[in-house]
Amino acid sequence: MSAKLAAQQTALLDLLHLNTIDLIASCADSMPANGHISLKNSASALRGLRAYRANAQELSVQALQASYPTLQQLLGEENFSHLAQDFWQAMPPVRGDLAQWGGELAAFLSQVPALQALLAEHAYLPDVARVEWALHQAATASDAVLDAESFQRLATQDPAQLRLQFSPGCALLRSAYPVVALVKLHDARASDLHGAAREQISNGEAQTALIWRRGFRPMLERTDAASAALIEATLDGHSLSQALDAAMAQAADFDFSAWLSISVQTGLLIGVR
């Protein structure tokens, strides 16, 4: 994108969030110095910007619906629509690409007064939002291919000098709630997600969500404590040796060979650096 186009998009986004008085002033400021500024001109420009703003807000709802389908089902369409419009006003997009907007929605949930009673009853909603945003990021992550030859390093080099390489968009999210099950139930078109959550929460089920990209498809699975420790250590920049120590601290009998085989087959692990 050219610097000129980026500047034009930024200016337009700024205009869409001005109040009425500021919009009129902005319209006036945009007139030529030797031109005639009239209420008619300002009103016409203001109507255009209002129409553009209304359309942009509708697009914001659609953009968040695409990123947060499970959250929309849990909140209900009306609540979700109001949430999207409030979010647009509080944390507007700063890029022309709306697919890059929405990452702060999980944190924003706690700032919406109308949703506090719902959040008090269903405290897992922010974690569901975090998982869905991670899936969205995985879906739009850079492409990568399996480096099969790099796995030979596991047999010839010191693990302290190696680091595992995961699929683009790989993320690990720990939750006290059954977030993986909830998102998967949405995919299965379950009608009562809150009921399913209550049932699983009553069993004390916390879940760690593992997100990655397999080919062009974002993947979601729950993972055990040892695997989570290994993945988390790797994502934090630690060596294979340190990641293995973290895994074995969770489970002394952790089978790295079995984990390695499954991780390559599922596309989670794509190489060794």
Image: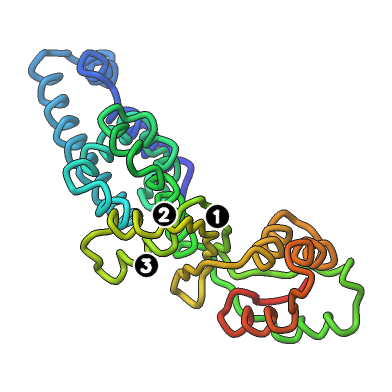
Q: Which quadrant is home to the C terminus?
A: bottom right
Q: Quick check: marks 3 and 2 in contact, CB under 8 Å?
A: no
Q: CA distance from mark 1 to mark 2?
A: 17 Å
Which residue is labeled 3 in the image? Answer: 184
Q: Quick check: marks 1 and 2 in contact, CB under 8 Å?
A: no
Q: Is residue 171 left or right of residue 192?
A: right
In the rendering, at what x and y percent does residue 122 appear? 34, 44
Nearer to us in this view, 200 or 255:
200
Query: Between tags 1 and 2, which lies in front?
Result: 2
In the rendering, at what x and y percent does residue 78 appear? 16, 43
Looking at the image, is mark 3 or mark 2 earlier in the sequence?
Answer: 3
Q: Residue at position x 47%, y 47% from top?
A: 2
Q: Is residue 43 above or below residue 116?
A: above
Q: Residue at position x 90%, y 77% from top?
A: 157
Q: Which dot marks residue 173?
A: 1
Q: Residue at position x 45%, y 69% from top?
A: 218
Question: For residue 253, what is the image quadrant?
Answer: bottom right
Looking at the image, is mark 1 or mark 3 earlier in the sequence?
Answer: 1
On the question of residue 35 being in view, the answer is: yes
Nearer to us in this view, 234 or 100:
234
Which residue is labeled 2 in the image? Answer: 201
Residue type of the residue flagged with mark 2: Ile
